Image (cartoon, rainbow, N blue to C red):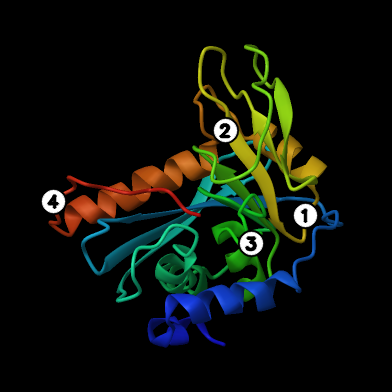
């Protein structure tokens, strides 16, 4: 199935497709050096059919911005928790296809396998684009964990039905943790280490922070009112 076909799916069919994709998830160590990393984010009003996508490329590990791509698309797929990827992936794929050089790993502002069907945006997009992905979310979608200690890089494993699905990571003292989970073609341990290497004084990692700024910029430039804004992948 192509992302362009998502518009024709019912929620029940979308869930069935997630179960199909789940069989293809590959959580194994990335076996090549990372020279280029990218961050991706989506912005939309849940009551609008317009979706804004942005990807920012960085050299790694110094995190110097070396490129970017944006896309604006429309969707009629309903806003349903757990199925937001069906609204977001087509726009993100448009931005991805505009990149002349692809990153070695893509960090998305949302969930990887830390999703009740293990198909958060990072996993979904990683499977569709056949690329290594990591989910770095600002809020928990599913899973249980013990609150990590109040020190930078304190962490706590997240479990769902006995399965390790992610790590709650304290990226800054006195801040809520972020929620890291592999998307596809990268291990849990690598996902956490890569995100730790991308923290630059803010709660969220620099790749997705810059992608967030980029999508907000193109949304403002488009003239859309930014009240009621959503930036949560799941």
Between the residue at mark 2 and the residue at mark 3, the CA separation in whole angstroms equals 20 Å
Q: Residues within 10 Å of mark 2 (few under 14, many from 20)?
A: many
Between the residue at mark 1 and the residue at mark 2, the CA separation in whole angstroms equals 18 Å
| Residue at figure coordinates x 35%, y 74% from the top left | 77
- Which numbered disc, 2 or 4, marks the residue closer to the eye? 2
Looking at the rendering, which quadrant does residue 81 occupy? bottom left
Question: Which residue is disc 3 drawn over?
Answer: 117
On the image, the x and y values in percent for residue 106 come to 61, 55
Q: Nearer the viewer, residue 24 or 133?
A: 24
SS type, badge 4? loop
SS type, badge 1? loop
SS type, badge 2? strand
Q: Residues within 10 Å of mark 3 (few under 14, many from 20)?
A: some
Numbered marks: total: 4
On the image, the x and y values in percent for residue 3 come to 49, 81
- The disc at residue 178 is 2
Question: Which residue is disc 1 drawn over?
Answer: 186
Compared with residue 164, is residue 62 higher up or lower down, i.e. above or below? above
Between the residue at mark 4 and the residue at mark 3, the CA separation in whole angstroms equals 33 Å
- Which numbered disc, 1 or 2, marks the residue closer to the eye? 2
Between the residue at mark 2 and the residue at mark 4, the CA separation in whole angstroms equals 28 Å
In this picture, residue 221 sits left or right of residue 55? left
| Residue at figure coordinates x 34%, y 63% from the top left | 79
On the image, the x and y values in percent for residue 170 come to 62, 23
Q: Earlier in the sequence, mark 1 or mark 3?
A: 3
- Which numbered disc, 4 or 3, marks the residue closer to the eye? 3
Contact, mark 1 vs mark 2 (Cβ under 8 Å): no
Contact, mark 2 vs mark 3 (Cβ under 8 Å): no
- The disc at residue 225 is 4
């Amino acid at each position: 199935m192509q992302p362009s076909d998502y518009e024709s799916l019912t929620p029940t069919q979308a869930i069935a497709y997630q179960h199909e994709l789940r069989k293809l998830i590959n959580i194994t160590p990335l076996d090549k050096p990372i020279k280029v990393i990218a961050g991706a984010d989506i912005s939309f009003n849940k009551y609008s059919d317009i979706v804004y996508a942005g990807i920012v490329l960085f050299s790694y590990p110094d995190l110097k911005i070396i490129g970017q791509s944006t896309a604006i698309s429309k969707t009629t797929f309903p806003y349903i928790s757990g199925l937001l990827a069906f609204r977001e992936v087509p726009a993100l794929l448009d931005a991805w296809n505009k990149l002349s050089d692809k990153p070695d790993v893509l960090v998305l502002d949302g969930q990887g396998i830390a999703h009740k069907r293990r198909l958060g945006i990072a996993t979904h997009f990683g499977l569709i684009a056949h690329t290594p992905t990591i989910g770095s979310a600002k809020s928990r979608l599913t899973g249980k964990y013990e609150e990590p200690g109040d020190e930078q890089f304190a962490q706590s494993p997240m479990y769902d039905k006995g399965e390790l699905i992610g790590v709650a990571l304290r990226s800054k003292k006195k801040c809520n943790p972020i929620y890291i989970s592999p998307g596809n073609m990268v291990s849990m341990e690598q996902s956490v280490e890569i995100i730790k290497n991308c923290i630059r004084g803010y709660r969220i990692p620099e790749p997705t922070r810059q992608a967030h700024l980029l999508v907000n910029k193109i949304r403002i430039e488009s003239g859309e009112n930014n009240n009621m804004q959503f930036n949560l992948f799941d």
